[in-house]
Image (cartoon, coloured by chain):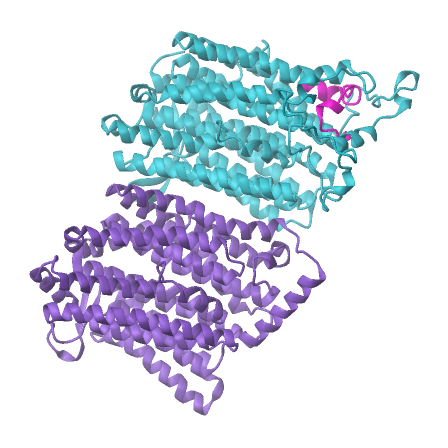
Chain colours: A cyan, B purple
């Protein structure tokens, strides 16, 4: 590996930071404002992409700005792992920018300037996290990311959004405190926090008690954003944000920055060998295995689509953490490859949920019977991505899960293999009903859904029956009339009567045969929505298929191999 | 210019007299003279600071007496920082006060006297002399608090007077004990003599206890903080900005002087109990101050309790007492002064312009007053310790120092203080940006009522002037930019801290 001094890493961070200023300045001219977003996204992708060939040939691009605090340089290093994350984030930002424009204009949202500015700031911080050269710089951007994403979570300004925002701040800043504490410990033990492939040398000789404490603090701190149970509950609540935010930030950038932090800690701070020697990998893997299983089970019972996707995210993120914590080379490849694989698939799913919301205001799965007729392309993309989530071959999820399974078997952790397989089955169990109901049911002929509808265990039958038949849409929050809910529901039961009513508005007897209620038929040529939204959906879905069919041709697997080889010395 | 150290104290006093005398002839000359004086003061302190940071401390004996008997002025890196800080903040607040008031000549005269007192406290090398300046500072601060026009200001000043005088008396008693034990008042001399008497002598211990508790009152460490919220909330906006930025800061500086220059680290080693008390003061102040801040509904009271909490960090650094922590203390003293002064002035500006003086009235400010709300938000985040702002850097040093000495409980509280600070600022940020103002008839009436009160207390109901905006925005920018240069400052401070701990 050779270090090359270059301004490209800092340029990649700054380009969207500059865009923030331009976006704020052109708040009176929406078209100009959005063009800044697109321009910045394109430029950022170009800058990050330009570093890929060099990184693949073993170069590391470094920008060193100066000393920040004693012993710690404020430096950015674009190494293989960093480029993996940065490339993913900047590529998907460009896609999401188009989608955001379609989504926000489709809903005629308020405060769009703030939204696009905060989005650009979030991406700036995300790239900073990817390229951070040491724990302190990583912490700096990790905190800035929290600050930049808060306006997006609380975007609506409703009571629910504010509560979600508060919870988000409390959880992520709490995680930040743990990260800072772990960083202080590492610095105190070794006098450095710089990322070193294979681990910081001084840590191996340090007192193992403090070593373990530092690992626990760092893993817990990053685990908050990686939504490890029991630190995950901010994520389902943050679904109150507009759907592009749920898609890019809460399935890709923010949560992956937590996972990325764990990867840095395992690979470049402690090193896989030391993590194994300290015996801290197994507890982390156990937490991850428990999380991925339980989250899948919880997802089964979510009727609200965005909540189901959120718990699916919680579960899938733990695949990555599990792969990192098992420590075998194959498991590491599987875990790291699942970062882009999950990103493409989950982004597709969220984009689909958002498109359905914008077009029909239908958010609960129980109201989606027959919606495949109204939105054929969207629901097909949804089907493809959910197959990938379940690990069916030819879609991205298969490749990474395959590596994960081999990795857990080859290191002898059969229990984890079992958890992965079980979760795969559960994935089918919670995604298939959505596809099934969309294409094979109709509004007047749909099967009962006992898992969702019945009270858990049957004993706590407090029943949500209310004498007035529940709340009507107009007697909720006073701001509900003017503000959109972005498909969010506060509990697993979904939005209830309100969503049913909004769905009914789309159904008409003229659409179905024999005068039955049905969705309007739209063709496969893109009449179901705007191409601002369909384009990104199809792009992300295509991406997950490419990653699944020709993983070696897509650049991500090559980068992942490079990372694992340099961290473990084993060529995979 | 060998008399510069004396001049830096005397000049603001003369300027203060000038304000008063010229004011008799031409009534509206207070502000120009005070501003001119502040600019000159910055030049003097700047040139002194250059000398203070270069090599050995500048020592100057007043009136040509020899050292243990005459009053000595000492300028090292730490005191140079303080005098520059005092001069700069004084100028900044003057820029704000021009429109915001109070505007009488007696106000400007008192203002300059306060600057003299604070500067004196910073550079004196004599404990009794320090008491004198402490009293000058105290009395002028009481007067400034009382310069608001409402009854509330008068009551606040009275409470401040009673509690502050109590603290100063304890400080004086402490000096008395030390004098009885050693027969000297010069700091450098005292540290040698106290060692000779023996650190475990009860006389020396009593002196330490009284001095520290006296200064605790002045710094407003919980539970001796009771004057602070009343005084800060009751004072006119410009005054609360000034005293929140400087008075407690310089008192905390004085505590560093007393603990490390007079009693030295060896005293703390010989008396673990003393360190425990400092540490307990720090922990209790951080936690309780934050909790009380969360409970406040008035912005200025909230900010005052925030100070109680933030000074807990400084006390914590003193209790840790290694070079990392003390560098952190110095950085956080400067950082906190800029941030808290900035917050008070921003709160004042928001109060003047939008009439928002309580937490609920901050609703929807992001829309009506974007620059004011933005500045407030940025400084608040800096206070929380979001990197790379100055608030983070100070906290990093102090936390690292605590870890280095393995003071785990203190380290944990310092790190968790981030969340505690977040607890009271997040509330405001949320209200500014994600809530629409409640438009009920009753709240409009109360807003009008507060406006009326504001007009009465400040003598203004006018829109903010250019000077006010400039000061506020500068504070916001500084609280971010200083974080980037803090490392260089820490390097400059290194010889001073080494000398302090040797």
Measured as percent of width and height from the top left, residue A504 is found at 82, 29
The quarter of the displayed image where residue B305 is located: bottom left
| Residue drawn where x is 34% and y is 17% of the image | A568
> Can residue A559 be seen by looking at this rendering?
no
Q: Is residue A515 visible?
A: yes
A54 over A249 or under it: above or below: above
Closer to us: A520 or A526: A520
Q: Residue at x 43, y 55 (%)?
A: B479
Looking at the picture, how far across and down is residue B497, in whole percent? 22, 54
Seen in the picture, residue B145 relative to A568 is either above or below; the reply is below
- Image-based side of B332 in relation to A152, left or right: left
In what quadrant of the picture does the C terminus of chain B appear? bottom left
State the image coordinates of residue B425 (x, y, percent, origin top left). 50, 51
Is B408 above or below relative to B477? above
Point out residue B156 in the picture as x, y percentages from the top left corner.
45, 72
Q: Is residue A177 magenta?
A: no
Range covered by the magenta-colored residues: A360-382
Image quadrant where residue B187 sits:
bottom left
Task: Name above or below for residue A516 compared with residue B39.
Answer: above
Which one is nearer the viewer's eye here, A293 or B380?
A293
């Amino acid at each position: 590996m050779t270090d090359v001094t270059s301004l490209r890493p800092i340029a990649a961070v700054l380009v969207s930071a500059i865009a923030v200023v331009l976006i704020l300045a052109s708040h009176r001219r929406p078209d100009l404002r959005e063009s800044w977003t697109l321009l910045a996204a394109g430029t950022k992708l170009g800058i990050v992409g330009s570093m890929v060939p060099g990184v693949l040939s073993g170069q590391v691009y470094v920008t060193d700005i100066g000393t920040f605090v004693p012993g710690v340089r404020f430096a950015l290093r674009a190494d293989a792992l960093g480029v993996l994350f940065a490339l993913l984030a900047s590529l998907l930002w460009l896609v999401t920018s188009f989608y955001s424009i379609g989504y926000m204009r489709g809903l005629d949202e308020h405060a769009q300037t703030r939204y696009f500015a905060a989005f650009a700031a979030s991406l700036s911080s995300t790239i900073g996290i990817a390229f951070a050269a040491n724990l302190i710089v990583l912490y700096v951007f990790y905190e800035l990311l929290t600050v930049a994403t808060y306006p997006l979570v609380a975007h609506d300004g409703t009571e629910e959004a504010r509560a979600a925002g508060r919870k988000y701040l409390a959880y992520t800043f709490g995680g930040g405190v743990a990260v800072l504490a772990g960083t202080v410990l590492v610095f105190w033990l070794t006098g450095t926090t710089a990322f070193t492939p294979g681990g910081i040398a001084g840590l191996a000789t340090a007192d193992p008690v403090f070593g373990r404490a530092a690992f626990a603090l760092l893993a817990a701190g990053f685990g908050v954003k990686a939504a490890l149970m029991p630190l995950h509950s901010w994520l389902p609540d943050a679904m109150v944000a507009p759907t592009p935010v749920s898609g890019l930030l809460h399935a890709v950038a923010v949560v992956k920055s937590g996972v990325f932090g764990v990867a840095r800690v395992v690979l470049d701070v402690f090193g896989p060998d030391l993590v194994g020697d300290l015996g801290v990998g197994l507890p982390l893997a156990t937490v991850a295995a428990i999380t991925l299983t339980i989250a899948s089970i919880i997802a089964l019972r979510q009727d609200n689509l965005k909540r189901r996707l959120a718990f699916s995210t919680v579960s899938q993120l733990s695949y990555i953490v599990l792969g990192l914590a098992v420590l075998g080379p194959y498991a590491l490849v599987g875990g790291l490859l699942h970062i882009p694989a999950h990103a493409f698939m989950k982004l597709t799913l969220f984009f689909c949920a958002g498109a359905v919301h914008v077009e029909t205001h239908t958010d609960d799965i129980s109201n989606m019977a027959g919606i495949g007729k109204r939105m054929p392309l969207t629901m097909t993309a949804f089907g493809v991505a959910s197959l990938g989530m379940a690990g069916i071959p030819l879609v991205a999820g298969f490749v990474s899960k395959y590596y994960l399974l081999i990795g857990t078997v080859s290191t002898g952790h059969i229990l984890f293999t079992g958890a992965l397989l079980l979760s795969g089955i559960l994935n089918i169990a919670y995604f298939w009903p959505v596809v099934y109901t969309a294409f094979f049911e109709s509004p007047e002929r749909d099967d009962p859904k006992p898992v969702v509808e019945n009270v858990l265990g049957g004993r706590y039958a407090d029943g949500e029956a209310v004498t007035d038949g529940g709340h009507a849409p107009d007697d909720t929050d006073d701001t509900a009339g003017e503000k959109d809910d972005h498909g969010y529901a506060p509990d697993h039961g979904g939005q209830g009567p309100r969503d049913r009513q909004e769905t009914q508005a789309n159904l008409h007897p003229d659409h179905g045969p024999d005068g039955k209620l049905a969705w309007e038929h739209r063709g496969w040529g893109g009449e179901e929505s705007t191409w601002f939204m369909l384009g990104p959906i199809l792009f992300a879905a295509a991406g997950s298929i490419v990653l699944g069919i020709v993983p070696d041709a897509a650049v991500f697997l090559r980068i992942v191999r490079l990372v694992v080889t340099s961290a473990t010395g084993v060529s995979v | 210019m060998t008399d510069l150290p004396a001049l830096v104290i005397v000049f603001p006093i003369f300027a203060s007299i000038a304000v008063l005398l010229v004011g008799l002839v031409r009534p509206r000359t207070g502000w120009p003279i005070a501003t001119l004086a502040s600019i000159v003061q910055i030049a003097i302190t700047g040139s002194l600071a250059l000398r203070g940071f270069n090599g050995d401390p500048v020592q100057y004996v007043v009136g040509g007496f020899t050292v243990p008997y005459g009053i000595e002025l000492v300028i090292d890196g730490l005191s140079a920082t303080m005098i520059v800080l005092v001069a700069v903040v004084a100028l900044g607040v003057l820029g704000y006060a021009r429109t915001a008031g109070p505007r009488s000549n007696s106000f400007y005269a008192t203002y300059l006297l306060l600057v003299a007192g604070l500067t004196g406290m910073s550079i004196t090398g004599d404990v009794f002399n320090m008491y004198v300046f402490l009293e000058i500072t105290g009395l002028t601060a009481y007067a400034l608090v009382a310069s608001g026009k409402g009854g509330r200001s008068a009551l606040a000043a009275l409470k401040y007077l009673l509690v502050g005088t109590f603290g100063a008396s304890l400080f004086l008693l402490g000096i008395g004990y030390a004098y009885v034990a050693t027969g000297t008042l010069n700091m450098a001399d005292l540290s040698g003599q106290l060692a000779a008497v023996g650190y475990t002598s009860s006389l020396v211990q009593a002196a330490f206890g009284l001095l520290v508790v006296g200064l605790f009152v002045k710094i407003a460490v919980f539970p001796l903080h009771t004057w602070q919220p009343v005084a800060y909330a009751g004072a006119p906006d410009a005054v609360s900005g000034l005293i929140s930025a400087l008075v407690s800061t310089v008192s905390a500086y004085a505590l560093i002087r007393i603990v490390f220059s007079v009693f030295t680290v060896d005293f703390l080693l010989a008396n673990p109990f003393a360190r425990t008390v400092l540490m307990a003061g720090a922990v209790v102040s951080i936690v309780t101050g934050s909790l009380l801040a969360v409970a406040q509904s008035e912005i200025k009271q909230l900010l005052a309790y925030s100070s109680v909490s933030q000074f807990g960090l400084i006390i914590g650094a003193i209790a840790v007492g290694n070079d990392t922590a003390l560098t952190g203390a110095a950085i956080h003293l400067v950082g906190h002064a800029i941030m808290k002064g900035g917050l008070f002035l921003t709160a004042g500006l928001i109060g003047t312009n939008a009439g928002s003086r309580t937490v609920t009235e901050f609703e929807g400010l992001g829309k009506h007053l974007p620059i004011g709300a933005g500045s407030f938000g940025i400084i608040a985040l800096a206070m929380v310790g979001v990197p790379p702002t100055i608030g983070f850097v100070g906290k990093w040093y102090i936390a690292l120092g605590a870890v280095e000495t393995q003071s785990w409980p203190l380290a944990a509280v310092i790190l968790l203080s981030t969340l505690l600070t977040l607890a009271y600022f997040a509330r405001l940020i949320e209200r500014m940006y994600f809530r629409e103002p409640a438009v009920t008839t009753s709240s409009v009436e109360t807003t009008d009522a507060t406006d009326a009160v504001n007009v009465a207390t400040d003598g203004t109901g006018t829109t903010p002037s250019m000077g006010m905006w400039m000061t506020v925005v500068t504070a916001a920018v500084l609280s971010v930019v200083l974080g980037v240069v803090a490392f260089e400052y820490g390097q400059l401070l290194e010889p001073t801290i080494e000398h302090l701990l040797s």
